[in-house]
Image: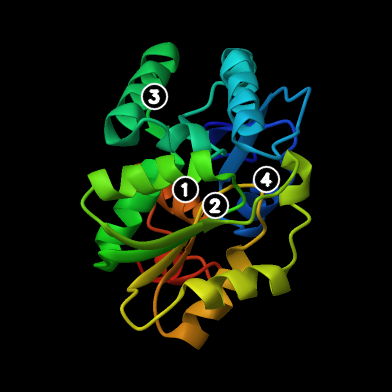
Amino acid sequence: MTNVVGSRAVFGVIVPSTNTVVEHDYWSARVPGIAYRTGSMHIADPIMRNDRDFEALLGQIRASIDTAVRDVLTAEPDRMVMGMSAETFWGGVAGNAAFERRLRERTGLPVTTGASSCRAALRALGCRRLAIFSPYQPVADREVGRFFTEAGFDVAAISGLRCPTAPDIARVGPDRILDMVTALDNPSVEAIVQVGTNLSFVAQADALETELGKPVIAINAATLWHALREHGFTDRVSGAGRLLRDF
């Protein structure tokens, strides 16, 4: 027994301090015996109105991630989960691999990242041609597209919501997201992928899968799925998309 509330596992979850969605999505899945200990990366300046701002925000994440990881390790977690997206895509496939390697060496634990989770999810679902959306600026969308292209997928389209601040990501409502998905989707697209962990999309993605007749992958659902399956847990979760329900 890991502990009373996490009798099967405790997942350490690293999020930006501006993020209010990841923990909600994970706990809402109600996976029995899985607990989450969140570590926060301090974001003093959450402005991301353009590419330069966004790269500065990423710099804040890089400067504070070690402290967040240090704090989480005091809870003796069984796995580290990155509850943030952009940094895990940066530098393409090689950048993701290097990021994961550093984190494994730092913690001695298995690691789940958004980039690897989405790649594994798309392979499990048998999808190759993608449309992707994010809350980001163009500099980050290019890195996301680079990762998926290098991973062997065909990126039909990618677009960002261009949120002006990090907290504004959590304020994007379902109507604006639906407009984005509608603009990106077409019959040639085999799956819709959403990145940006502070965007509330898990329940909407589940509904859109029925409407569109194709996989719609919310990144928070993908990271939870990856963490569970890689850790040997086969629990099925309803209301969070086909991935967690069927795979």
Q: The residue tagged with tag 3: helix, strand or loop?
A: helix
Mark toward the start of the polypeptide (2 vs 3): 3
The residue that label 4 is drawn on is 23
Q: Which amino acid does label 4 sit on?
A: Glu
- In space, the residues marked 3 and 1 are separated at their CA atoms by 16 Å
Answer with left or right where residue 58 lies relative to residue 40: left
Question: Foreground: 88 or 2?
Answer: 88
Determine whether 228 is above or below 221 in the image. above
What residue is rendered at 51% in x and 58% in y?
A: 159
The residue that label 1 is drawn on is 223
Mark toward the start of the polypeptide (3 vs 1): 3
Q: Which of marks 3 and 1 is in front?
A: 3
Q: The residue tagged with tag 2: helix, strand or loop?
A: helix
- In space, the residues marked 4 and 1 are separated at their CA atoms by 12 Å
- In space, the residues marked 2 and 3 are separated at their CA atoms by 19 Å
The residue that label 2 is drawn on is 220
Horizontal and vertical percent position of residue 18: 75, 36
Do we see residue 232 in this rendering? no
What residue is rendered at 37% in x and 70% in y?
A: 191
Find residue 99 and name its label.
3
Q: How many marks?
A: 4
